[in-house]
C-alpha cells in the first residue's frame, strides 16, 4: 500500500501541534462531563447511548444492521450497546411492519423523554460555554466542528455521521 503524501508540509507544525493538543483536551473534557449539562449528573448519558437514541429519534425505527451501517460500526457492537437501552425501557424491539420475522429497534416514549432531557441539559451547557459569543461565532464554530468530524470520519472510514440533534 503506498504511503500517503505528507499533508503536514503545507501547514505550520505549531498550528497542527496546537490543534491536536486542543482536540485531546476537548475529548477529555467532553468525556469527563459526558456533556451532560452543568452540574447535572442525572442528565448525563453515555456517548454510545446518546448517539443510538439520537439516530433512532432522527431516522425512526430500524433494524440492527441499518443502525450499525448508519453509525459506521458493526452489528455486534450495536447489539451490545442497545441491550441496556432495551432493558431500561428507552428502546423497544418490535416486529418489522413488512416482515413480521424481522425485528426493528424503536425509541420508546420513555426514551424520547429521556433524550429530550439530555438534549435540553446539553443545550444549556453549550449556551454557557459559548456565553459571550455572538450567533455568527457559534455558527462558524458549529460549521467547522461539523466539517472536522466529517473529515475525521472519512480518514478513519467510519461511515456516515450522526445528524445533529434538532
Image (cartoon, grey):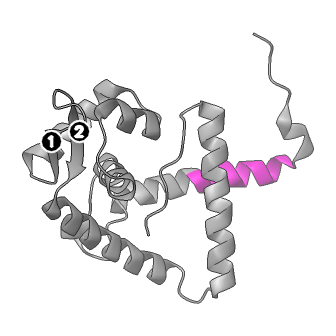
Q: Residue furthest right?
A: 10
In which image quadrant can residue 128 be found? bottom left
Q: Name which of mark 1 and mark 2 comes first in the sequence.
A: 1
Residue at figure coordinates x 53%, y 47% from the top left: 161
Closer to the camera, 131 or 63?
63
Closer to the camera, 98 or 94?
98
- Crowding around mark 1 (Cα neighbors within 10 Å: few <14, some 14 to 19, many 20+) is some
* Residue 85 on image: x %, y %: 17, 47
The residue singled out by tag 1 in the image is 94
Residue at figure coordinates x 87%, y 49% from the top left: 12
Q: Is residue 13 magenta?
A: yes
Task: Point out the image quarter for the N terminus.
Answer: top right
The residue singled out by tag 2 in the image is 104
Q: Marks 1/2: CA distance?
A: 5 Å
Q: Main secondary structure of the magenta part?
A: helix
In which image quadrant can residue 146 be found? bottom right
Q: Is residue 157 magenta?
A: no
Closer to the camera, 25 or 56?
56
Task: Point out the image quarter for the C terminus.
Answer: bottom left
- Name above or below for residue 80 compared with residue 4: below
Q: Are marks 1 and 2 in contact (CB under 8 Å)?
A: yes
Residue at figure coordinates x 22%, y 41% from the top left: 97
Q: Is residue 15 left or right of residue 136?
A: right
Q: Is residue 35 left or right of residue 92?
A: right
Amino acid at each position: 500500500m503506498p504511503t500517503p503524501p505528507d499533508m503536514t508540509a503545507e501547514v505550520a507544525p505549531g498550528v497542527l501541534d496546537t490543534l491536536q493538543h486542543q482536540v485531546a483536551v476537548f475529548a477529555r473534557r467532553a468525556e469527563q462531563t459526558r456533556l451532560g449539562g452543568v452540574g447535572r449528573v442525572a442528565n448525563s448519558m453515555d456517548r454510545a447511548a446518546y448517539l443510538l437514541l439520537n439516530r433512532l429519534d432522527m431516522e425512526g425505527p430500524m433494524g440492527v444492521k441499518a443502525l450499525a451501517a448508519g453509525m459506521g460500526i458493526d452489528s455486534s457492537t450495536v447489539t451490545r450497546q442497545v441491550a441496556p437501552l432495551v432493558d431500561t425501557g428507552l428502546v423497544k424491539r418490535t416486529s418489522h411492519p413488512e416482515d413480521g420475522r424481522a425485528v426493528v429497534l424503536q425509541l420508546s416514549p420513555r426514551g424520547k423523554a429521556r433524550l429530550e432531557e439530555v438534549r435540553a441539559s446539553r443545550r444549556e451547557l453549550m449556551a454557557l460555554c459559548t456565553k459571550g459569543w455572538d450567533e455568527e461565532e457559534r455558527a462558524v464554530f458549529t460549521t467547522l466542528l461539523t466539517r472536522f468530524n466529517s473529515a475525521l470520519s472519512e480518514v478513519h472510514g467510519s461511515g456516515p455521521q450522526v445528524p445533529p440533534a434538532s
